[in-house]
Amino acid sequence: GENVEQHPSTLSVQEGDSAVIKCTYSDSASNYFPWYKQELGKGPQLIIDIRSNVGEKKDQRIAVTLNKTAKHFSLHITETQPEDSAVYFCAASRRTSGTYKYIFGTGTRLKVLA
Amino acid sequence: NAGVMQNPRHLVRRRGQEARLRCSPMKGHSHVYWYRQLPEEGLKFMVYLQKENIIDESGMPKERFSAEFPKEGPSILRIQQVVRGDSAAYFCASSPQGVATNEKLFFGSGTQLSVL
């Protein structure tokens, strides 16, 4: 069935370094790829998204890249800060029956060490 | 503009009791989704509703679980005769009306259900 694989499951980086999280999806009809940040005890918050007609999108220290051919997309966080520590989820989504069906990755726990 | 509101934040039930989780979507949103999250795991889709209609319940267990989104009031996820395996965080998300923008999901803070 449809599936999204996310790696790594945990990631520790020194403050100021970059962090990269990668996802692979199986459904070639997916055309919308959001990333969510979940802090402890809170719900996931949308931080950036990309559509399949775009290869890269950047928002300050966060960027997302998409390779449709390989069905890969990645989240890049530069100049990491302690407040970036959280669990990050990727998702692949496509329109079906009047709505968007989301498949989430299993999450990456990012720890930024001061 | 308030976000997605879920209550209660924490719910404790004994085995065999009923659990009712409530979700009020963001203002102007008419699509509601329920997800379940087990510790150290991702978000698993349960059900998608629009006002007075269940659109997709393919992720919801066939027994003991039900969901509704009435014309007036919040969406309700109901779990009857809870078992310990139902213990999890349940998240509600909503999305706006409209073909061009309805792909963005906005999540609530979740309800942590603990079954004793």
Image: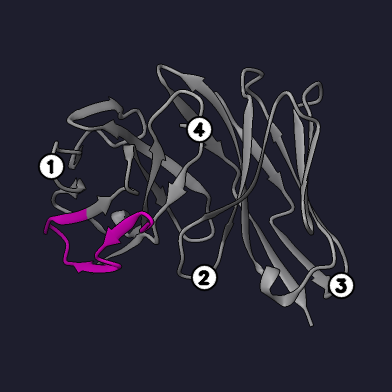
**In what element is the residue under mark 1?**
loop
Tell me the magenta residue range: B1-21
Pointer 4 local density, CA inside 10 Å: few below 14, some 14–19, many at least 20: many
Outermost residue on the front side: it is: B1
Judge if badges 3 and 1 mark residues of a common chain: no
Location of residue B21 by image quarter: bottom left
Residue sitting at 55 percent across and 67 percent down? A39
Q: Disc 1 marks which residue?
A: B72
Q: Which mark is residue A16?
A: 3
Give the x, y percent position of residue B113.
Answer: 29, 63
Q: Judge depth for marks 4 and 2 and give the one in front.
A: 4
The answer to if B16 sits in the magenta stretch is yes
Say if A74 sits above or below A62 in the image: above
Chain assignment, label 4: B
Q: Amino acid at mark 1?
A: Glu
Judge if badges 4 and 1 mark residues of a common chain: yes
Q: Judge depth for marks 3 and 1 and give the one in front.
A: 1
Q: Judge depth for marks 4 and 3 and give the one in front.
A: 4
Is residue A44 rendered to the left or right of residue B114? right
Give the Cα distance between marks 4 and 3: 33 Å
N-term-proximal mark, 3 vs 2: 3
**Residue sitting nearer the eye, B3 or B87:** B3
Residue sitting at 27 percent across and 31 percent down? B50
Q: Disc 2 marks which residue?
A: A40
**In what element is the residue under mark 4?**
loop
Give the x, y percent position of residue A68.
Answer: 77, 24
Pointer 1 local density, CA inside 10 Å: few below 14, some 14–19, many at least 20: few
Is residue B10 rendered to the left or right of residue A111? left
Q: Judge depth for marks 2 and 1 and give the one in front.
A: 1
Chain assignment, label 3: A
Q: Disc 4 marks which residue?
A: B103
Whether pointer 4 and pointer 1 mark residues with C-beta atoms closer than 8 Å, the reply is no
